[in-house]
């Protein structure tokens, strides 16, 4: 099945790409472009979609958002290519600073309402069920469900 982004999801990805391109603010043009990104971020992502998605080099520009409302992504988080993120997902730290954030591999599918918290690793091609709370690391090809999340993938 080919990944699909709805128009709202594609808009958020474009705004993230703009932010990633200019967030280091080296010269005057980049500072102005970053200011434009901050306006788009505030009025579209924060106000319209009620989401907080902080950009950094560690977040892929190839994310896929379905129903991108209520999403929180900490800027210190690492998210791989082709990850699918659904509504009400939180990806964040469990402490102070960027070194306490999750690392999410490539092709990970995250269900609605899932919470991924702390300095943990989620392996490539894993699936995280709706409303799962993930607070520890799991290998690639995991299927995570529950509170706290457990791997139900068959070996």
Image (cartoon, grey):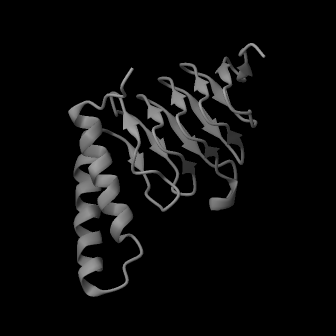
Residue 47 shows up from this direction: no
Q: Which quadrant would the C terminus be assigned to in this image?
A: top right
Left or right position of 48 against 55: left
Depth check: give the residue in front, 152 or 33.
152
Report the number of numbered marks.
Answer: 0
Left or right position of 82 against 6: right
- Residue at 66%, 22% in the rendered image: 144
- Residue at 41%, 42% in the rendered image: 63
Residue 37's spot in the image, x, y percent? 27, 63
Depth check: give the residue in front, 94 or 12.
12
**The quadrant where residue 32 appears:** bottom left
- Residue at 31%, 86% in the rendered image: 27
Residue 74 shows up from this direction: yes
Q: Which quadrant would the N terminus be assigned to in this image?
A: top left
- Residue at 72%, 23% in the rendered image: 148
**The quadrant where residue 19 appears:** bottom left
């Amino acid at each position: 099945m080919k990944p699909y982004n709805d128009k709202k999801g594609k808009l958020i990805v474009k705004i993230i790409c703009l932010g990633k391109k200019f967030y280091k603010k080296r010269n005057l043009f980049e500072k102005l472009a970053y200011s434009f990104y901050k306006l788009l971020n505030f009025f579209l992502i924060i106000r319209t979609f009620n989401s907080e998605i902080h950009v950094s080099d560690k977040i892929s520009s190839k994310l896929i958002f379905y129903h991108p409302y209520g999403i929180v992504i900490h800027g210190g988080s690492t998210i791989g290519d082709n990850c699918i993120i659904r509504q009400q997902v939180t990806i964040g730290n469990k402490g102070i600073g960027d070194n306490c954030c999750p690392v999410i591999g490539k092709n990970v599918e995250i269900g609605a309402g899932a919470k991924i918290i702390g300095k943990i690793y989620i392996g490539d091609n894993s699936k995280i069920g709706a409303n799962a709370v993930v607070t520890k690391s799991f290998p690639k090809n995991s299927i995570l469900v529950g509170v706290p999340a457990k791997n139900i993938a068959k070996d």
